[in-house]
Structure formats: C-alpha cells, structure tokens
Amino acid sequence: DAEITQSPRHKITETGRQVTLACHQTWNHNNMFWYRQDLGHGLRLIHYSYGVQDTNKGEVSDGYSVSRSNTEDLPLTLESAASSQTSVYFCASSENRDRGLYEQFFGPGTRLTVL
Amino acid sequence: LAKTTQPISMDSYEGQEVNITCSHNNIATNDYITWYQQFPSQGPRFIIQGYKTKVTNEVASLFIPADRKSSTLSLPRVSLSDTAVYYCLVGPGSSNTGKLIFGQGTTLQVKP
C-alpha cells in the first residue's frame, strides 16, 4: 500500500547543530508540505512544494530549508537548531487537482527536542 | 485565506450526536470547507469537504448554509474513540494554489 513515512520518529539534538528530517511518500503526489505543531496549538506551515525543484516558504520558514530533487522525498533541514524549534514535525502530501477534493495525507510525525 | 473561528473545546457522551460549528465570514467564492481530525501523537486525518448545502460520508455530515459564512460538522452517535481535535479549514479548491491553515481546532472529549 502507498504511504507516507517520516524518519527519525524521535530526535534529540543540541543547539547549533544541523538536523535533517526525512519525509518519503509512495503515492507519487506532486504536492508535499512540512508543518510544525507545538503543544496546545494547531499546525503551522513551514515549507511546501508543488513539484520537483519547486519550494515555497510557509508562515514559519525562518531557520528551515527544504529541497525537492525527486517526487517522493522532501527533506526538512534545520540549519542551526535552536531550542525554539523543539516541536513535533509533520510531513504531508496531496494529489494535484484543479478543483474540489484535495485531501492531504499526513505522516506519523517526528518529535524533535533541541537541548 | 479565510480565517475560521470554532469553539476551543466541547464535551459529549457516548451515543450522542455532536455538532461543531465553524465561522468563516470572509470565505471567498472559490473556497471549499474542509474538516480534519487529529488524535494524540498522530497526524491529522481528512474527514469531509464541501462547497455548499450538505455533504455526507460514512464518518460525518457537513452542513453549509446558503451564505456559506459558517459550517457545521455533525458526528452521529459518537463513541469514546471520537475523542480528538477537529480542525475546520477554508481554502481554494485547487490544490496547486491552496495552502492549508490550521487554527487551534476544537478538542472534543467524549465521556462514557
């Protein structure tokens, strides 16, 4: 079955280190998204991509970067991890549609702790 | 993107029907209304989407009045497993221009 996976599921790192979170989907979806979710809050969009070589900033993109070299993967990089980036990170993907239903499928999440 | 307002929390009992209303006064003509469900330690899951009137699937119903300035998610006969956070989102139906904006959602607690 097609799916979306994230790795690692849990990560502890130190302030200033570079960290990369992986996201892989097997639906062949064009659209991929990264969100962060902090305790008691909804999800906030970090970066998103509508296809290979396409990346766009979301509402909380500072300190994060993404690259899209193929359809299946959208890795999220924290260039220099900060304690404020301690959060749960969700990756999602969706099919390209002109109108109507375009549900996003979410991965299981990665819990990142920056000490 | 249209801003949404929904109750922070709701309580219900098993077997009851639960209605969660979402306000979206500045919804645009090409916006759709979508609801997601999120269980603890999991990513959100799509429940239902609609444009106008009523939409029903095996999980829920979505009622949208003619002015589309609000919508109501209806969960029939809830069980303990329906305890979750429910998000109302409003945005373009075209997926290659739409970005989902999640608010705080409504935390539904179903009691035995």
Image (cartoon, coloured by chain):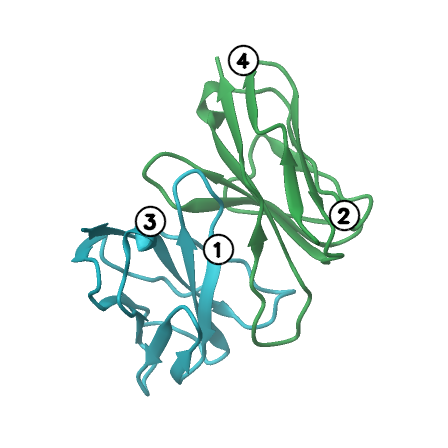
Chain colours: A green, B cyan
Do dots 4 and 3 share one subunit? no
* Image location (x, y in percent) of residue B60: 37, 70
Using the image, determine if residue A105 lies above or below residue A6: below
Callout 4: helix, strand or loop?
A: loop
Chain that bears disc 4: A
Q: Which mark is residue B104?
A: 3
**Tag 3, which secondary structure?**
loop
Amino acid carrying mark 4 in the image: Thr
In the image, residue A37 lies at what x, y percent?
44, 39
Image quadrant where one finds the N terminus of chain B: bottom left
Q: Which mark is residue B45?
A: 1
Residue at disc 2, secondary structure = loop
* Disc 1: CA contacts within 10 A as few (<14), some (14-19) or many (>=20): some
Chain where mark 1 sits: B
Q: Amino acid type of disc 3? A: Gln
Q: Looking at the picture, which amino acid does disc 2 mark?
A: Glu
Residue B105 can be seen, yes or no: no
Residue at x-position 58% and y-position 54%: A105
Depth check, mark 1 against mark 2: the one in front is 1
Residue at 36 percent across and 52 percent down: it is B103
Residue corresponding to mark 4: A15
Say whether mark 2 and mark 4 are on the same chain. yes
The vertical placement of A92 against A40, above or below, is: below
**Callout 1, which amino acid?**
Arg
Labels 2 & 3 near each other (Cβ < 8 A): no
Say whether marks 1 and 4 touch (CB < 8 Å): no
Q: Chain of mark 2?
A: A
